[in-house]
Image: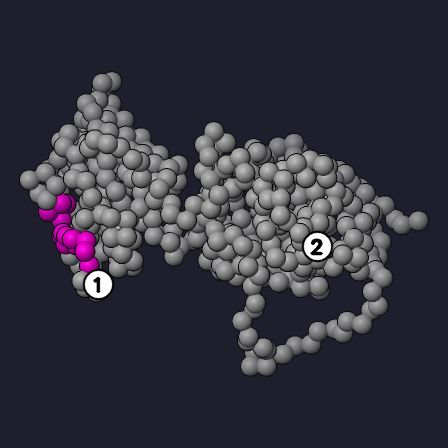
Amino acid sequence: MAKLKTAFYCQNCGTQYAKWQGQCNACKQWNTIVEELIQKEDKPAWNTSAPETKRASKPLLVAEIDSAQEIRLNTGDGELNRVLGGGLVPGSLTLLGGEPGIGKSTLLLQISLRLPYRTLYVSGEESQKQIKMRAERIDKSASNCYILTETKTQNIFKQIQALEPEVVIIDSIQTLHSDYIESSAGSISQIRETTAELIKFAKESNVPVILIGHITKDGAIAGPKILEHMVDTVLQFEGDRNHVYRILRALKNRFGSTAELGIYEMLGSGLREVANPSEILISHKEEELSGTAIATTLEGMRPLLVEIQALVSTAVYGTPQRSTTGYNAKRLNMVLAVLEKRAGFRLGAKDVFLNITGGINVDDPAIDLAVVAAILSSNEDIPVPKGYCFAGEIGLSGEVRPVNRVDQRILEAEKLGFSAIFVSKYNKVSLKNTMIDIKLVAKIEDVAAHLFG
């Protein structure tokens, strides 16, 4: 009989201890250390029936390594392809996390139904009939998707050997368990062991694997932090369950950029790709209102136009309030100080509220100029002329600083029908014969003079 031994793991960060203690030394959390049984024995390979013909790898010179670009698998979903960096890399392991009910299972089931490759969708949370009901609502014409309801990794690998799928999707990693670990499913050691088995399978068979991961109440992916280090890509599916729009971000990507963004709309028939995000980030109104301005920003390679809303009013309770949604609060305080000191606008005794529509957070400093325009518009109670947008960073001396990839921002604004765009006069604009009016400004005072006379 195999020798059994116990170990103590922190359920928050995964640190292992020889004995129990009240506080974890790594993450400083209390009462998170629990005892788990671990069975120590030699584990066979995932393909136990396959003959052992694999040779040990040997070191190669850099010049000897084949530099041919890795072929990516097209998922059939433009938003997911963009976030992944062009598609699924064979042999990669992707982890998708998000709030309960946000649509993780719907997204991956929708992708598995539309993939032109033989796909195995493994669910440990729903029955085959439940998945069938959702699949009929999403896509009835699927012919390459196989559904398996199983939680034991050894049984999953037996079905993989028989089916030989080209893509494997696991829903979810917290429901899997291995015979070689005695602890319950979802524990630190089980998550680590089952993930290691899936990584070994993916690298040896060159089949991409996508995992769904639960998250904790703090928003982090449940399980040990090493889980995120083990996988190749970590995706985060965000959004409010009370709204129809969802945002897909890459927190880690070994094969592409982490700055890309994917936007979906939740419908009764599944998730719809939003090819033009400006349709949800710019509100449609019949009359012009003060306190709104349009900013051009970039998320990875994608230009977006977002609406900035500001409300400036006299402070009722004596101490002025500064509140932001989707914009850095410290940066707002800096912009207000610049307006007070350099441009002469008296905002010190007024409440300032700022909101970026669409529920997204923007870190691009190029929206500073639109923030200034929205604040001044609300303060003066004069609407910004319709068709105007802005792209510029504000410096501490009140100057409008240049921003990167300004040509791409201008072309996106022109494509969406804007008539004028304000950019820094220090930007090198190489575009010619454009229909949009490019207004070059150097200081905040120039912008105020253009907008309000």
Residue type for callout 1:
Leu
Few, some or many residues within 10 Å of mark 1 (<14, 14–19, 20+): few
- The disc at residue 28 is none
151 is higher (above) or lower (below) than 252: above
What residue is shown with label 1?
431
Q: Secondary structure at mark 1?
A: loop
Residue at 31 percent of width and 39 percent of height: 282
Few, some or many residues within 10 Å of mark 2 (<14, 14–19, 20+): many
Q: Secondary structure at mark 2?
A: helix
What residue is shown with label 2?
198
Depth check: give the residue in front, 397 or 86.
Answer: 86
Residue farthest toward the top in the current orientation of the protein = 317
Quadrant of residue 199 within the rendered picture: bottom right
Q: Quadrant of the C terminus?
A: top left
Label 2 vs 1, first from the N-terminus: 2
Q: Which residues are magenta?
A: 434-447
Residue at 47 percent of width and 29 percent of height: 242
Q: Is residue 64 visible?
A: yes
Please check the rendered image and state whether residue 42 is part of the magenta-colored stretch, yes or no.
no
Residue at 68 percent of width and 39 percent of height: 132
Q: Is residue 85 left or right of residue 209?
A: left
Residue farthest toward the left in the current orientation of the protein = 453
